[in-house]
Image (spheres, grey):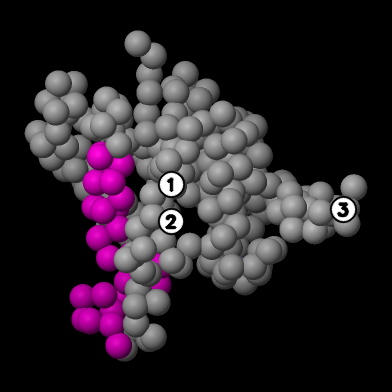
Amino acid sequence: MGKIAILLLSGGIDSAVALYLLRSRGYDVIAISINYPGRWEREKESARELARLTNTKLIEVDLPFLREVDELWNSEEERPNHLRDAHPSTIPARNAIIYAVAAYYAETLGIETIVAGHNADDTKYFPDTSREFRKLISRALTIGTYIGRARGFRVIAPLSRLSKTEVVKLGLKLGVPFEYTWSCHNNYDVPCGQCNGCLARKRAFDELGVRDPLEEAISSGRDWWLLRKKPGTRP
Ligand SMILES: [Zn+2]
């Protein structure tokens, strides 16, 4: 039997690179995209496009209760003490929930590998992206699922030792169509250029001395999202 994995695909850079990396290593991939209210439309659509481009089955799961902490409370002062210093994009117990959802599909489909796109920068801000957490949840799912008891279960993050810049470098080598990825934390049609997501993305491409294909597509009028929104206005 061929290798198969479930990938958590967000439409951002990291999970897109993870998708192409898995394919280059001969994996069949089933992607899961988690839809929650704060998620940006273009990012959701990017996940769909990446799946379409790679012939990957995409399962979309709605989790309407999920909120980022900066939506749950208006200011850091209002947050409960233990979350006061949390990154604004933190979702309470995010990966415990998302890995569990992926484990549902893994058990159902007979797959024992879940892949997350976390990079080395994530571990600075999000405790649920640590290697220790993946190791322990892998152990729990090995004990607590039928597929795990039969074959062992693993939750892995193949990009977890790479910085954002190294992830982009790997993606360029793998031919990732970065114009179909979205990093902006705002629900705009084009990146705002100011938010943490945009700045981290820009830094990565700048450090490599490469122009971001998304920027290139937008400035040359060939951006897939804008073309789709305005049919007939561009060649
Ligand atoms: Zn932005």
Contact (Cβ within 8 Å) of mark 2 with mark 1: yes
Sequence-wise, which precedes: disc 3 or disc 1? Answer: 1
Q: Is residue 39 left or right of residue 149?
A: right
Whole-number angstrom distance, CA of label 3 to CA of label 1: 30 Å
Residue 80 visible in the snapshot: yes
Q: Residue furthest left?
A: 143
Vertical comparison of 213 with 1: above or below: below
Residue of label 2: 35
Specify few, some or many for label 2: CA neighbours under 10 Å numbering under 14, 14-19, or 20 or more.
Answer: some
Relative height, residue 74 to residue 191 (above, below): below
Q: Looking at the image, which is closer to me, 215 or 59?
A: 59
Q: Which residue is mark 1?
A: 60
Instruction: Report the span colored magenta.
Output: 78-104
Estimate the spatial distance between the alpha carbons at disc 2 and disc 1, rounded to whole Å. Answer: 7 Å
* Tag shown at residue 15: none
Q: Which residue is mark 3?
A: 232
Count of picture labels? 3
Residue 208 seen in render: no
In this view, the mark in front (3 or 2): 3
Figure check: 157 above or below 202: above
Q: Is residue 8 magenta?
A: no
Q: Is residue 103 magenta?
A: yes
